[in-house]
Amino acid sequence: MLFQEDEGLSIITTKDLAESHGFRDYTFPCKKISLAVQSSLEAVGLIAAISSKLASHGISTNVVSGYFHDHIFVPLGKEDAALQVLQDMMKAAESIIQK
């Protein structure tokens, strides 16, 4: 993924692909977690709630929203903890819906 900003080009890619093209100075080695839920681009608050919950567990995020799904990039080594937080959020939401 490429994002052109005024300050320069941001690239989201795999480590192997970056290194194969001579890029070794990366700044955010991470894992991508794709949300299975198909959210609307007009939905309000979903990503804020997820980011806030992950932040409360000391997990930073970089979020990319596609048309069909949101993708949360978390620091390498924090992916298991992030998945646990997301699963806990899903269980809490399901229990509210069942009531």
Image (spheres, grey):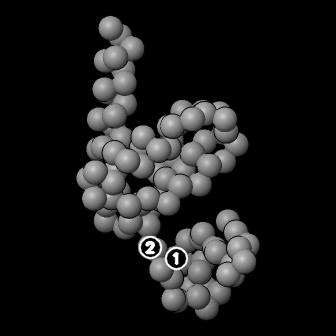
60 relative to 57 in the view: left or right: right
In the image, what residue occupies the spot 29% across and 44% down?
84
63 relative to 21 in the view: left or right: left
In the image, what residue occupies the spot 31% across and 26% down?
92
Relative to residue 98, is residue 51 depicted above or below?
Answer: below
Residues at circles 2 and 1 in contact by the CB criterion of under 8 Å: yes
Which residue position holds label 2? 29
Label count reads 2
In the image, what residue occupies the spot 47% across and 80% down?
27
Along the viewing direction, whichever of 32 and 60 lies nearer the viewer = 60
Relative to residue 50, is residue 62 depicted above or below?
Answer: below
Q: Secondary structure at mark 1?
A: helix
In the image, what residue occupies the spot 60% across and 77% down?
17
Which residue position holds label 1? 15
Whole-angstrom CA distance, mark 2 to mark 1, is 8 Å
Neighbor class of circle 1 (other Cα within 10 Å; few <14, some 14-19, many 20+) is few
